[in-house]
Image (cartoon, grey):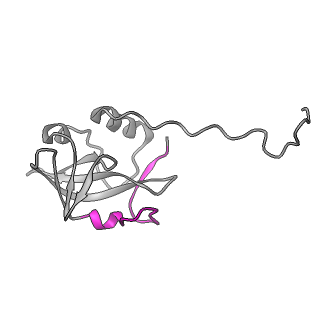
Amino acid sequence: MERVRPVGGTVQTDIDPRSLIGRKAFDRDGNKIGTVDEVYLDDATGVPEWAAVRTGLFSRDAFVPLEPSELVGEELRVPYDRALIKDAPDFGVGRHLSPQQEVQLYHHYGIALPAAPPPPDRDFGRLAGQDD
């Protein structure tokens, strides 16, 4: 699994994830969760994967998955219940998510882990019919 980093580099999507920062986030029932604080990209693909949403009076950040979420007008709609989002593991913001932290988030939201990339082709560069 690739590590995820806060946004700041080149993005390979049609929406600039930096434009999500500062937007209000809402749960599946339309309840306000908070404000998007940071967006995290997959290191290998540059695809936005997680958003850190600043919640409540105590101003903690809850990580929410961007894949099933939608940008509707000026709002980020997260298809999970507000209580589940607020109970998400708190890893702080501003640094990489480790692969272990990312697995915890996948489990928390009940999301299947992404498939591992295929192993490298060990036959690359060999001629067909050639034995080792």
Query: In the depicted view, which residue is nearer to us: 56 or 22?
Result: 22
Query: In the depicted view, which residue is nearer to us: 17 or 73?
Result: 73
> Where is 88 relative to 26, above or below?
above
Image quarter hosting the C terminus: top right
The quarter holding residue 79 reads: top left
Total number of numbered discs in the rendering: 0
Q: Residue at x 72, y 40 (%)?
A: 121
Is residue 24 left or right of 63 when viewed as pictured?
left
The quarter holding residue 111 reads: top left
The quarter holding residue 24 reads: bottom left
Is residue 112 left or right of 70 when viewed as pictured?
right
Q: Residue 16, percent across and down?
A: 36, 66
Q: Residue at x 64, y 37 (%)?
A: 119
Q: Residue 51, percent across and down?
A: 29, 53
Q: Residue at x 20, y 64 (%)?
A: 73
Look at the image and say whether residue 36 sits in the magenta stretch.
Answer: no
Query: In the depicted view, which residue is nearer to us: 94 or 53?
Result: 53
Look at the image and say whether residue 11 sits in the magenta stretch.
Answer: yes
Q: What secondary structure characterizes most of the magenta part?
A: loop
Q: Residue 108, percent across and down?
A: 28, 33
| Residue bounds of the magenta highlight | 2-21
Is residue 33 left or right of 39 when viewed as pictured?
left
Q: Residue at x 53, y 36 (%)?
A: 116
Is residue 81 left or right of 131 when viewed as pictured?
left
Q: Residue 115, percent across and down?
A: 49, 36
